[in-house]
Amino acid sequence: MMPFRCVPLALAAAGLVAAGCTTAPHRYDLIIRGGQVIDGSGQLARRADVGVQGDRIAFVGDLAGQSAGREIDASGRVVAPGFIDVQGQSGTTLLADGNAESHLRQGITSEIIGEAGSPAFWAKGTEEGDSLTPFGLTFDWTGFDGYFGKLRAEGTTVNVGTFVPATMVRRAIVGLDNRAPTADELSRMEAMVEQAMRNGAFGLSSALIYVPGTFARTDELVALARVASRNNGIYISHVRGESFNLFNALEEAIAIGRDAKLPVVIYHLKVAAKANWGRMAEAVALIERANSAGIRVSATMYPYTAGGTGLAATLPLWMQEGGREKLLERLRDPATRSRARREIETTIDGWENLLMATTFSGIQVASVPREFDQSLVGKRITQIAAERKADPWDVYFNLLIDTGGRVGALYHMMSEADVVTGLRAPFVTIGTDSAALRSEGILAQGAPHPRAYGTFPRVLGKYVRETKTLPLHEAVHRMTGLAAAQMGIPDRGQIRDKSLADLVVFTPDTIADTATYERPHQYATGIDYVVVNGVTVLDPRGLTGARPGRPLYGPARRQ
């Protein structure tokens, strides 16, 4: 006869109380006591202890009388699964500083990178060396396993996975030209995606407002997505338009999922440009109709009314074709600048016209090269123009020319009401769309988007506690269990027996973002403890120095 075994998790899920259910004497490596456990499944909080053995959750329930090598008093706090950043951008910053502090202090324990680029797929001649230079680093690894091996050797506090970017695949085979691939080239591109999936990518990503990804036509993306599909991956896209062309862009992404037969995720769902404000409900309805038709479509969001990307992305696509040197050559020609201005002012169809979606009064300089005038950082284009008594168009073009096109910018172009509507959609998860930074040193340069420091606590502070946009258990579900399901990450995202022990302990009454557009390098408050793979990496004193983060592998490699 099998001995009686207490199963409090199953009983709790059924809404039952296990009368007389106790645990056998046992010593755990870590016990988190007395917290309100929100397990990530979408269920309400319940008071429970969490016992951890090694890198796994071993018990959730009453651990009175049990001992552990380490204990955390979670009284008055919430215990949740570690937050999953479904749109991280830390591919290079983790090489410079594996502490990932601006993300860790938000409660993030896992990050998926690879929107337009991923160092895991760099090769000689296509590496993005400019992103390493500020940190004094060089490209010295080979392939997917070489990159993740380097991360493991240096150590990271967070777990990291990646998509294979269609942008990188196109650049490697077709280059920077605006043309369709030949049949042979497309076959080689498909082979690259196949190898990337087998190496461990979670799926195919696309970034369709950036060169050269924007040159990809729908049939090309369908062909590559079919490769991801047969490897059980997903298709995730920065769609071709988020302002004047939003709905056509969403339809394209949905069609790719339908034709390639795989789930679709929309990166950072938004409705940009004042003329479109109030249409988020239409975007949500479009996605819901796709789901009703049997196409699995979801989205990510960050809880801000500004976006962020390079200033060069505001130029017409023909200006950007061929790479940076070609771009600068065109910018230096007065006649070409005049043509670009006319097109920006008069054409909104067929490309993402970020400048008209934002206007100069809404574009804020976020970063310029270190050797450039740093006093410009944080200022709007209109403010710089007023100070110089210059035309905003001249300021705009000269900034691009003088910096070699290396200007980061924030775009204040969304409405608060649309952010709220989007966050309420049940298929939306949360992503920073930012690299992990630090409030001092080399990673504290410029004025980045505050989402790098505040995304997850902003949801829990502003949109849960203050505005009641979401209930707490639902917000945690979006950041954990739903995110893991959306990305296809097993054994993470829920607090349950045998799950990997990625955990965050936070104070719901005080959790908040403190980073602002004017002062972005400020850590969030209210995150008390972070545990990654069973190891405490953050406590009330600060970083512990442990770096137990691991590579996260996609479905083809896990098979």
Image (cartoon, rainbow, N blue to C red):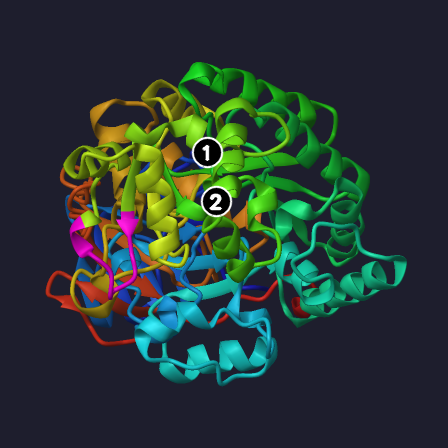
Answer whether residue 144 is visible to the viewer in this image.
Answer: yes
Counting labels gives: 2
| Segment colored magenta | 366-375
Residue 53, numbered circle: none
Residue 193, given in percent of the width and then of the height, sits at 72, 63
Magenta span includes 348: no
Residue 409, given in percent of the width and then of the height, sits at 34, 45
Magenta span includes 373: yes
- Closer to the chain start, of discs 2 and 1, is 2
Residue 181, given in percent of the width and then of the height, sits at 80, 55
132 or 64, which is in the foreground? 132
Instruction: Work out which quarter of the rendered image holds the N terminus and state it.
Output: bottom right
Residue 508: quadrant of the picture: top left
- Report if the CB atoms under discs 2 and 1 are less than 8 Å apart: yes
349 or 474, which is in the foreground? 349
Q: Secondary structure at mark 2?
A: helix
- At 24% from the left and 60% from the top, the residue drawn is 372
Spatial CA span between label 2 and label 1:
8 Å
Q: Is residue 23 left or right of residue 200?
A: left
20 or 260, which is in the foreground? 260
Alpha-carbon neighbours of circle 2 within 10 Å: few (<14), some, or many (≥20)? many
Alpha-carbon neighbours of circle 1 within 10 Å: few (<14), some, or many (≥20)? many
Q: State the residue position of label 2.
A: 313
Q: Secondary structure at mark 1?
A: helix
Residue at the extreme left? 541
Amino acid found under the numbered disc labelled 1: Leu
